[in-house]
Every structure is written in structure tokens, then in C-alpha cells.
Image (cartoon, rainbow, N blue to C red):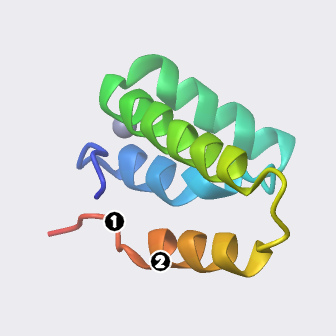
Amino acid sequence: MSNCGSGDDCLEACKRLFGYLDGELTAEQAAEFEAHLARCGRCADAHAAERKLLAAIKSSEAGSTDLDLRRRILAALRATPPRSE
Ligand SMILES: [Zn+2]
């Protein structure tokens, strides 16, 4: 699933992607992540795609209390390992 680039910076950014989207990063980590997106088109694309997906999940759960489903979807997404050779 990952479209992240293969540099060390990209792997770090990849690992932080979900934390960033969930607001779980420290301000410093979030700033580093944003700085990486600003200079790395591949990670910026991956971030945009994930954000869109999360937005779709969130909007699909509007009016629903099925948080368990959302958690399972997110868990499945997170289980996809970053690409690393
Ligand atoms: Zn990158």
C-alpha cells in the first residue's frame, strides 16, 4: 500500500503518517513530518491519499456508532508494513 520513497527520511515519515493523521505526534515530530512532505513529493502523495481515505472512513461513520468497524479498518491499514528491502 505504501507509496513512500525508500530513503531513511521516507521510512520515518511513513511510520509517522498515521500518528500525524491521528494527532498523536509531538509538535516537533509533526513539524519534521510536514518539513519532509514539503520536500518529498512521494510522501506528500502518500499522505494526501491516506488523509482522503481517513476522511472517507470518518464520513462513512457519521450517524453510525460502529467505532469497532473503524478501528478494524485502521488496524488493517496499520498492519501493512512499510516497504523496506
Ligand atoms: Zn519521503
Q: Is residue 20 visible?
A: no
Q: Position of residue 41 (x, y in %)?
A: 34, 23
Q: Which residue is mark 2?
A: 76
Where, by quadrant of the figure, is residue 74 drawn?
bottom right
Pick out the residue farthest to the top: 38
Q: Which residue is mark 1?
A: 82
Residue sitting nearer the eye, 67 or 43: 67
Q: Is residue 71 visible?
A: yes
Kindly indicate whether the residue at mark 2 contacts the one at mark 1 (C-beta within 8 angstroms): no
Badge 2 amino acid: Ala
Q: Secondary structure at mark 2?
A: helix
Q: Position of residue 20 (x, y in %)?
A: 69, 47
Residue sitting nearer the eye, 65 or 70: 65
Q: Residue at x 68, y 76 (%)?
A: 71
Q: Residue at x 61, y 56 (%)?
A: 18
Q: Residues within 10 Å of mark 2 (few under 14, many from 20)?
A: few
Query: Which image quarter is the C terminus in?
Result: bottom left
Q: Position of residue 62 (x, y in %)?
A: 79, 50
Q: Residue at x 62, y 53 (%)?
A: 57
Which is more foreground, mark 1 or mark 2? 2
Q: Is residue 76 left or right of residue 30?
A: left
Query: Which image quarter is the N terminus in?
Result: bottom left
Q: Residues within 10 Å of mark 1 (few under 14, many from 20)?
A: some
